[in-house]
Image (spheres, helix red, strand yellow):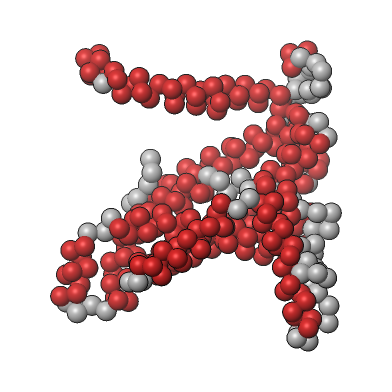
Amino acid sequence: MAAKLYKQRYLYLMLAPAVIAVLIFHYIPLAGWTMAFKRYQVGLSIWDVPWVGWDNFKMFFVQSKDYIYLLRNTLSMNLMSIVINLSFGLILAILFNEIRIRFFLKTIQTVSFFPFFISYVITYSIANSFLAQNSGILNQLLVKWGILSQGLNILGDGKYAWFLVVALEAWKSIGYISIIFLASISAIPTDQYEAADIDGASRIQKIWNITIPNLMPTLIVILILNSGWVLNSNFELYFMFTNPTNWERMEVLDMYIYKFGLKQLDYSYATAVGIIKTVVSILLVFSVNALSKKFTERSIF
């Protein structure tokens, strides 16, 4: 054992900065979870405030009932985003693989990948230009063509909130996800396609019998990794698009933690909600990984 460690000492030395960084920035801050079990007040040392046990957790689950709409919003929007992003990313990658004109392929890839780099501030400006109730291009056209008598309040009405978030997430992410699947397609042995050509298989048959089965391991790994983030929402997106008229359908756990932690300075309660979110996320990762291992014999650990 010692001889093996000494032999690979340079590899461990190269790994050490990353391990130290993870310890400092990811594990040492977990000591702050102590705050969830105390009645912390700004200006006092955490050791000078009284212990309150599980009171902050009871407040979230028993007294406030906020968890009902928070879990509904968070799970609904994130699950829909995961399903749609992965499905359309997979389909887009398969279509990319079938395009034979290289210039056309590169152009479409660039166009689909570009929204991934656009900040949510600019995304909000673009959405406002298209979807604003009175001045948005879409509403103006629909009213002009006589389809609507007045514009739809897509950015403010809560009944459009989930559709808006899922559509924006898809617009920004599908191009990026398709690149991941496209990299997996490039790793498929060409002799499988050559054998299919000899057997006279059509394009559709090659996609169905070769491309899609070879993409399943990548799809399962991405699905398992994303399952751990199903309670983590894109804060920038919700911060920009949440407003007083749609908050009940738009507010998610991350926005709730931000509201109590940084706006109302109730650090103890916000930390307790953050712990709940972390624990549920870990359980989801292990559950999805176990289900995948049982039904597909593929897992990441």
Q: Nearer the viewer, residue 88 or 82?
A: 88
Of all residues, the one furthest to the bottom in this rendering is: 146
Q: Quadrant of residue 178?
A: bottom left
The image position of residue 78, as x and y in percent, is 60, 54
**Above or below for 142 versus 116:** below
Q: Nearer the viewer, residue 285 or 247?
A: 247
Residue 105 seen by the camera: yes
Q: Nearer the viewer, residue 104 or 65?
A: 104
Residue drawn at x 46%, y 66% is: 108
**Above or below for 207 versus 37:** below
Residue 291 seen by the camera: no
**In the displayed structure image, the side of residue 222 where residue 158 appears, left or right:** right
**In the displayed structure image, the side of residue 291 where residue 50 appears, left or right:** right
Residue drawn at x 51%, y 49% is: 226
Q: Quadrant of residue 201?
A: bottom left
The image position of residue 141, as x and y in percent, is 74, 79
